[in-house]
Image (cartoon, helix red, strand yellow):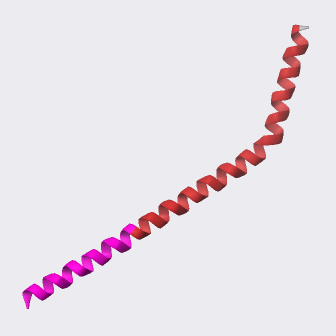
């Protein structure tokens, strides 16, 4: 009886993995893709903000020199 329970448990785990693994893989890829997009967007925003402050700072320095 114990062997049958072990085999049934193994079969159910293997079946669950075969059924849900593709969906889990797709979800993981989508989450990673969204994370990369959010990170890239954040970096681009920081870079743009940094450049805008550098331009404003250099413009104020040029005004001070005149």
Locate the N terminus by quadrant: top right
Residue 25 belongs to the span the image colors magenta: no
Whether residue 42 sits left or right of residue 6 in the image: it is left
Residue sitting at the far bottom: 66
Residue sitting at the far top: 1
The stretch in magenta equals 46-66
x then y, percent, for residue 41: 48, 66
Residue sitting at the far left: 65
Residue 51 belongs to the span the image colors magenta: yes
Locate the C terminus by quadrant: bottom left
Q: Quadrant of residue 55?
A: bottom left
Residue drawn at x 84%, y 16% is 6
Whether residue 55 sits left or right of residue 34 in the image: it is left
* Number of numbered markers: 0
As drawn, 62 above or below 10: below
Residue drawn at x 31%, y 71% is 50
Residue drawn at x 88%, y 21% is 8
As drawn, 13 above or below 40: above
x then y, percent, for residue 39: 48, 60
Provide the major secondary structure of the magenta segment.
helix
């Amino acid at each position: 009886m114990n062997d049958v329970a072990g085999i049934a448990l193994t079969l159910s785990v293997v079946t669950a993995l075969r059924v849900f693994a593709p969906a889990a893989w797709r979800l993981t890829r989508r989450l990673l893709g969204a994370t990369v997009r959010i990170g890239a967007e954040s970096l681009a925003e920081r870079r743009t903000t940094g450049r805008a402050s550098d331009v404003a700072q250099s413009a104020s320095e040029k005004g001070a020199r005149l």
